[in-house]
Image: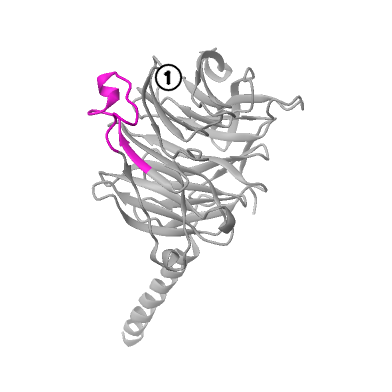
Amino acid sequence: MSIPILFEADYPLYSIRVRGDEVIVCGGGGVSKTGVPNGLDVFGLEGETAKHLGGFRGLRGAAMNMDLKKTGGLVAVGVDGTATFLSSVKKGKGSEATLEFTEEANLVTDQSKEPFQACIRFNPKGTLVATGGADGSARVWAHPSLKEVFSVVVQKKDAEVDDIDVDNDGHLAAVCGAQAKLFTTGPSGPAAEGKKKTEKSAQEPVTLVWANKSLFAAGKNQTFKFCRFVVVEGTPRLVTVMIPPGPDRGRQQCHLVLWNLETLQPLRSTSTGKAVTSTFAVSDDGVYLGLGDNEGFVSIYQTSTLKCLARRQVHELFVTSVAFHGSSLLSVSVDHYCVRTPLTAGGGGLTLSPAILMALISLFVLLFAYILPLFLSS
């Protein structure tokens, strides 16, 4: 089976985002003088190929995470404990157009002894930036002023905020090991008031608890790894990715959980396999969920049902980041490659999971068993 490689970078890739038909990737070799650059690059998608449009090589270390403002050319990348904001300007016209980047600002987002920004997210309107890091704190900054308007300690002891998300209403979700907490920072919170609030003055956070009965009975725990707000059939939901704690990784199943935000209870969950989920994304329309794991596989799930629609090994090493372009899932890895995994295979139908395929076969057999006697008796 051929792997649809879009392009190869000259450095390990750690993060990917998509804006229209532009693919933005970043990564690097770190601060050591190994000859491997630290950078950010933009490629324009043209059918099944990608054209390099421009890049930036002025980063002080490897860019480990990134997010984009939905409109305009702003990119925010995480290097150590700092968010670096880059703006882009298009030069030239037509097929000769390129992008040039300028460093706009640097924002210290983590206060630990060994600073590390683990995640960064713009809200959909681009008015807020949420960050999480090695100090266990989630912070929200107004944009473009970069004034801190909210900060809270998610977990105090030896815990890194693994993922964070913020919606248009200012609701913040942060996951940190065994903790998943929801905060209000919007219409009734500090973002609306233009004032900074700390954990003491902020609305009391809500902690999510997911207890899978079979795992709980066996004395096995799961930790929260990723979170995203989604809208499913017009209703706001939250999706979380659960992975086993360190000693049990590779031996226990990982899970996807869809949450009801009104009751704060899980609506449904599904196992995604024993390979540890290493990255997670949601399509722009909220219809699909994309996962990458530590064995180089990517998977596409339907958000409303949590059914697996496609699964494929596309990297030899672990997947570092995924992002959707339409219904196709783009993935990157430290192998330097960006790969496209379409929901359709070879222009045909869906790349179906074994469970769905067996269900369709069973349906066909039942229909055939019903129609054949009618045909023979006619």
Q: Which residue appears at 62% of the width and 20% of the height?
A: 59
Q: Which residue appears at 59% of the width and 35% of the height?
A: 14
**Residue 315, image x, y percentages:** 64, 47
> Which image quarter holds the C terminus?
bottom left
Q: Which residue appears at 49% of the width and 40% of the height?
A: 157
* Residue 68 visible at all: yes
Asked whether residue 201 is drawn in magenta, I would say yes
**Residue 266, image x, y percentages:** 32, 54
* Residue 350 visible at all: no
Per the image, the residue denoted by label 1 is 72
> Which image quarter holds the N terminus?
bottom right
Quarter assignment of residue 101: top right
Q: Of residues 26 and 96, which is closer to you in this image? A: 26
Task: Please give the range of residues in magenta.
Answer: 181-204
Quarter assignment of residue 198: top left
- Relative vertical location of residue 168 with respect to residue 229 in this rendering, above or below: above
Residue flagged by tag 1: what amino acid is it?
Gly
